[in-house]
Amino acid sequence: MELVLLTALGVGGATVIGAVIGFVFKKFSHKASDIVLAFAAGVMLAAAVLGLIIPSVEYGGAFGLVYAVVGIFAGAACINLMDKLVPHLHGMVGEESEQHNNQKLNKVLLFVTAIAIHNLPEGIAAGVGFGSGNTADALLIAGGIALQNIPEGMVIIAPMLAAGVKPRKTFLLAALTGVVEVLGTLLGYFAVSLATGILPFALAFAGGTMLYVISDEMIPETHAHGHQRGATYALLFGFCLMLVTDVLLG
């Protein structure tokens, strides 16, 4: 349990680390942010497939493939439903909102809400990983999510400061998105610990939520500013890095 709690704090704290970096550098070029975010997408993709979906098939026995397929679509559908029910903004806040401060602030807050929405299932994925009892896979998942949280924390700082949000409030809002992930990690861990029979489905469900976020949010964002070639190779590098890590840990 101590390892789970420390990992939850580490996963959530990665967002805070990213926020601190965001304060230091204030503004990143689209090319830099796209490459960093694409690398994080590759890391998350590997974590979802290697740490969640493949173990789901293995733990499910004769019905492993059924659990995996149903769980993946259920996880994706859950995030899709959250997208529709909770007002938020896809992608980073752009320059088109700079003319009206109030409108810009509203867009920033909607963007922060989007990050919070997606941090919850990412946290659940980390917690479910520990619930499986496979510490190596769990750390792989948590490490992938933490790496993704750093650039995520970086990119939300500049828009909030530009919208007139005070630095202290900006930092607190960024940290709050990390707290959501801590809560998600604990929720995922306790859910699987209390009902071990749902483990194969829960692993695939968590993997499905991550695949949805990667496809619906991260890849389109990294390919929207003319830097898609670099972003593609960054994603491949992130995926291969986690693949090598998984083999070495295994």
Image (tube, helix red, strand yellow):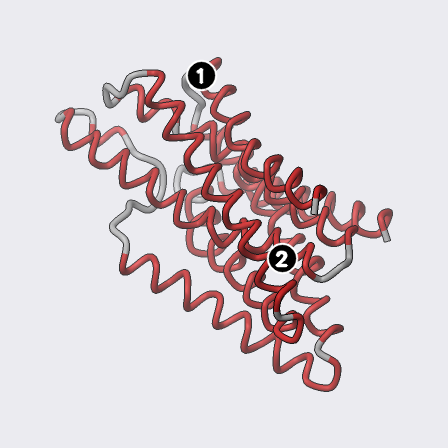
Q: Which residue is at a point 35% across and 45% down the rendered structure image?
A: 114
Amino acid carrying mark 1 in the image? Phe
Alpha carbons under labels 2 and 1: distance apart: 30 Å
Circles 2 and 1, Cβ within 8 Å, touching? The answer is: no
Q: Which of 159 and 135 is in front in this view?
A: 135
**Quarter of the image where one finds residue 51:** bottom right
Task: Say which residue appears at 31% left-offset and 19% top-offset.
Answer: 161
Q: Which residue ends up furthest to the bottom in the rendered image?
A: 62
Residue beneath the point at 86% across and 47% down: 248
Mark 1 lies on residue = 23
188 or 45: nearer the eye? 188
Rendering coords of residue 67 (x, y %)? 61, 78
Above or below residue 123? Residue 131 is: below
Q: Which amino acid does label 2 sit on?
A: Ala
Quickly name the residue at label 2.
48
**Residue 242's spot in the image, x, y percent?**
73, 46
- For the point 41% across and 34% down, which residue is it? 176
Residue 249 pos. (x, y %):
84, 48
Query: In the displayed structure, would residue 238 be above or below residue 125?
Result: above
Q: Which of marks 2 and 1 is nearer the N terminus?
A: 1
In this view, the residue in front, 166 or 53, is 166
Q: What element carries label 1?
A: helix
Q: Looking at the picture, does residue 148 appear above or below residue 211?
A: above
Q: Position of residue 15 (x, y in %)?
A: 51, 32
Q: Please tell me which residue lies in front, 115 or 93.
A: 115
Q: For mark 2, does the 10 Å Cα neighbourhood hold few (<14), some (14 to 19), or many (20 or more) residues?
A: many
